[in-house]
Image (cartoon, rainbow, N blue to C red):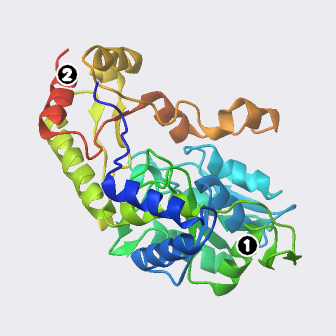
Amino acid sequence: MIPIAKPLIGQEEIRGVIDVLQSGTIAEGPKVKEFEEAFASYIGTKHAVAVNSGTAALHVALLARDIGPGDEVIVPPFTFIATANAVLFAGARPVFADVEPDTFNIDPGEIEKKITRRTRAIIPVDLYGHPARMDEIMEIAQRHRLSVIEDACQAHGAALRGRKCGSFDVGCFSFYPTKNMTTSEGGIITTDDAAVAGRARMIRSHGSKVRYYHEMLGYNLRMTDISAAIGLAQLKHVDQYDDARIANAMRLNERLSGVKGIITPAIADGCRHVFHQYTLRITPEFGMTRDQLIKKLSDAGIGSAVYYPVPVHLQTFYRSLGYDERMPVSEMLAKEVISLPVHPSVTPEEIDLIADTIRRR
């Protein structure tokens, strides 16, 4: 079976973990600090604050920007649910703005329609590893005096006109095992804002700068040195991993180009799309339903997945909160998208097998 995702763990990661275990410091310690500095340098920000998940990164970033009850935060509905849930964790209200059908990212024009006197922030998502239209989003935010918390959880190494995702205001990354790089579990906040970084460090550690002296309400959301050791090894290779994903994606695009009923992934001008997921749209002209294609791929030993089958605003929990506004693009995409394996372990021959299986009716 060609899996939809496969973490790459080698001897360097294993040696790093063993060194930490033998050091006696296995919780947050010097390796976390080293990883934070290395990741901030990689993204191009002054600060990075490591936490224990991408969800925690979003939650802490919102709190560090003092967003809470009575505030509204604009988010896309076509994303993993954590993007919106983090807003609820902070006590604020998610307001959904629909996405673009080609990049799958939040539509700046829809953002403008949703701004009210309660709006405090925008959370654009660099979905599947494709940068959101950050230049336009930052212009909107500056004009309306809003914070931008960039959900770059799927976009390690992605860039817009040479500027890395996560460097525009406050960025949030996930290091879940399926991501372009991993720490097993983990997340990180990137920013040039020293005040945001300082508050984030307190929030992740029980509201404390100095142990047992607590200045604010905080949580236990720290990364361990074990995770950081894995992250340090992975960070050395993330660009290589991304290049392999891009090469596999381009090979699939070439082999699926012109197939009726298939819309291959778009790449906007000036974008480095790092293909956390390679996502097709399957339209009725294809002559086969998405479920039928998934079964056909599975029978051929090819993994696939749907990210995401239900937009956030239509999830049972959100409907119970009274969300009922239609998001036509997100709802259309949820019915059409399918993701295929392009991770670095997939060989060119396997890419050809995937394409040939899809092309055969």
- Judging depth in this view, the residue of 111 and 192 nearest the camera is 192
Under circle 2, the secondary element is: helix
Q: Residue at x 26, y 47 (%)?
A: 344
Left or right, 273 with respect to 97, comes to left
Q: Identify which amino acid the numbered label 2 is placed on.
A: Thr
Judge whether residue 108 can be spotted in this image. Answer: no
Label 1, residues with CA under 10 Å away: few <14, some 14-19, many ≥20: some
Relative to 102, say whether 292 is above or below. above
x and y percentages locating residue 320 in the rendered image = 81, 33
The quarter of the picture where the C terminus appears is top left
Left or right, 235 with respect to 328, comes to left
Quarter holding residue 213: bottom right
For the image, the number of numbered tags is 2
x and y percentages locating residue 315 in the rendered image = 68, 33
Q: Residue at x 35, y 21 (%)?
A: 284
Judge whether residue 161 can be spotted in this image. Answer: yes
x and y percentages locating residue 186 in the rendered image = 56, 56
- Judging depth in this view, the residue of 252 and 64 nearest the camera is 64
Residue marked by disc 2? 357
Which is in the foreground here, disc 2 or disc 1? 1
Residue marked by disc 1? 64
